[in-house]
Amino acid sequence: MPAPTGSTPGDASNAAAPSGRRSNARRFLLPIGLLLLVVGVLALAYWWLVGRFMQSTDDAYLQADSVTVAPKVSGYVTDVYVGDNVAVKPGDPLVRLDSRQYQAALDQAQATIDAREADIQRAQAGILQQRAAIEQAKAQLLVAQVASRHAEDEVRRYGPLATTGAESGDQLSVLTSNRDQARASLAADTAALDQAQARMSDLNAQIAQAHAQLEAAHASARQSQLDLQDTLVRSTLAGRVGDRTVRVGQYAQPGTRMMTIVPVQNVYLTANFKETQVGRMRAGQHASVHVDALPDADLHGVVDSFAPGTGSEFALLPPENATGNFTKIVQRVPVRIRLDTDEQTRKLLVPGLSVTVDVDTRSSTDNTQSTTADNHHG
């Protein structure tokens, strides 16, 4: 049958070629579209199940509770026992100051102690001697009392005889004189006993004073001993030496900064999250830690605690929002995270390194849902 007017076999082949290309394109685009759809669904599911609960920040840095080493006494530095960046243990000697003046002060305090102890011994010996003097005064008083009674008896016996003329008046006068002398001797011996007893009280007061001075001398000696011990500056914790500025021959005053001991084995992480991120955070949640200095290491941590206020509250000059124009600024809350790493990795971590943190807050959501369900059930 003859071909239609105006058409040729070449035209038919040209029309079939675009349709074939379209079919081939559809065969390639359909799997790609399905793949993109699956990827999108998986990404949405991951965000719904995991991603929306992950809170991330790069405003995070490693920290450690470093201790500044400073002397308690003044003096010239005679020895420096540690170098830069070396490891130290608690009690290790770090720096020694010139101790000669403190040794002299201790020797002087010890001499004062010896002098006060000698004063006490002398006062105690005086008490023994005074006790003997008191006994002697008591014996003399007893003799005076006997003599006084005898003289009184003689006067009473011879008085009537002299009145009747049986005895002479001269004899009575002698007896009366003897009685008056015996009374005077009795009064003198009584005063001597009182004086001896008062001397005993004075000696006891001297001993009490010497004991007080001895205690003061002991206190001074203890202070001198402490000053002498403080000339050797020791480390109070384990760590590494940093920022060492002390040198031999330097004159150090109390509080002079010599070096810093950094407990690198106890490094922790402080992450400053926005206030809009911490609503679901709780202590005990897990965190993924990525240290910029260790790009190939994936570290783990646990949320330890939260600061009692935002960072601006503890700034040197806190903002005063009640004055002037107000612009709301999102605040940040310091969150402390405890690192869970092996010993080898921990040796590479030093305070100040920058960190990126991702905290998984799903556990708080689960707890909130279970608590709400328990409340409705109750």
Image: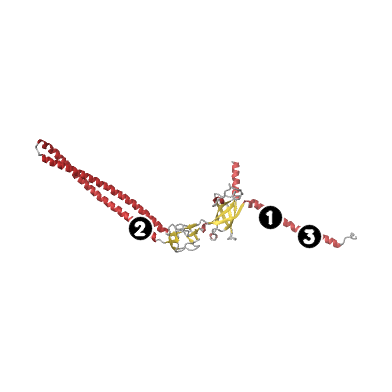
Which residue is at 67% across, 52% downward? Answer: 44
Q: What numbered label is drawn on residue 21?
A: 3
* Side of 30 where 285 appears, left or right: left
The N terminus - image quarter? bottom right
Q: Which residue is mark 1?
A: 39
Q: Secondary structure at mark 2?
A: helix
Residue 237 picture location, percent across and down:
47, 57
Q: Could you tell me if residue 94 is visible in this image?
A: no
Residue 353 picture location, percent across and down:
56, 59
Q: Secondary structure at mark 3?
A: helix
Q: What numbered label is drawn on residue 108?
A: 2
Residue 138 picture location, percent across and down:
22, 46
Q: Amino acid at mark 3?
A: Arg
Alpha carbon distance from label 3 to label 2? 110 Å
Q: How many marks?
A: 3
Q: Amino acid at mark 1?
A: Val
Q: Could you tell me if residue 191 is visible in this image?
A: yes
Closer to the camera in the image, 179 or 126 = 179
Please say if 355 is above or below 153. Answer: below
Q: Amino acid at mark 2?
A: Gln
